[in-house]
Amino acid sequence: MRKFEFFQFVPAGMEVVWDFFSSPSNLSRITPPGMGFQITSSVQKEMYPGMFISYKVSPISGLKLNWLTEITQVNKYNFFIDEQRMGPYRLWHHEHHFREVDGGVEMRDILYYSVPFGIFGRLADRVFVNNKVKQIFSFRKEKILELFPGK
């Protein structure tokens, strides 16, 4: 299993940041276009524990995968957690933490994931998956800077 932590400062108020990141409809805005990310279920404006969200995602050109996540915990203005219930990973547990700081909000993502298929999956992780996850969060970081430029 892999663990990543990503930090980002967002120069905006907590309510604005929370409203943006806790709205599933904004996921496609912070996902690389090449991933072909598309929400396939109807979603509420505000997430809640037990909410299921289904997607189609294309990590490799031409390969469309179904992905189902559940929002397992929500503590408004503090954190929420999504976990894969069906999809490309053996395990996907993603914590989104928010902390008010001078001038904005510090976001911290904690991601645990593992891939299926034993030794072949571990090899694919070393060669491809690990880098893809890092690219997704790198893209997201740049996109957030565009969306929340500050003053």
Image (tube, rainbow, N blue to C red):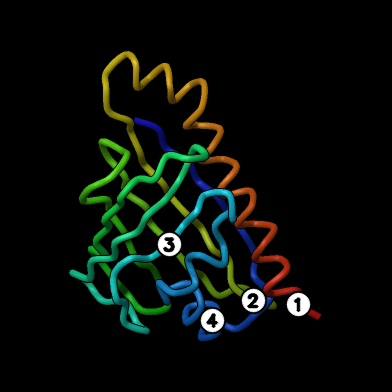
Tag 3 residue: 38
Q: Could you tell me how far apart the alpha carbons at marks 4 and 1 are, in whole angstroms?
A: 13 Å
- Could you classify mark 3 by the number of other residues whose Cα lies within 10 Å: few (under 14), some (14-19), or many (20 or more)? some
* Label at residue 104: 2
Residue 103, picture quadrant: bottom right
Q: Residue furthest right?
A: 151
The residue type indicated by label 3 comes to Gln
- Label located before the other in sequence (2 or 4): 4
Q: What residue is drawn where x is 27% and y is 57%? A: 69
Check the image and report above or below for 44 versus 130: below
Determine whether the residue tagged by mark 4 lies in a helix, strand or loop: helix
- Label located before the other in sequence (2 or 1): 2
The residue type indicated by label 1 comes to Gly
Q: Residue furthest top?
A: 119
Q: What residue is drawn where x is 42% and y is 37%? A: 3
Dot 3 and dot 4 residues touching (CB under 8 Å): no
- Could you classify mark 1 by the number of other residues whose Cα lies within 10 Å: few (under 14), some (14-19), or many (20 or more)? few
Q: Could you tell me how far apart the alpha carbons at marks 3 and 2 are, in whole angstroms?
A: 30 Å
Q: Residue furthest left?
A: 50
Q: Could you tell me how far apart the alpha carbons at marks 2 and 1 are, in whole angstroms?
A: 9 Å
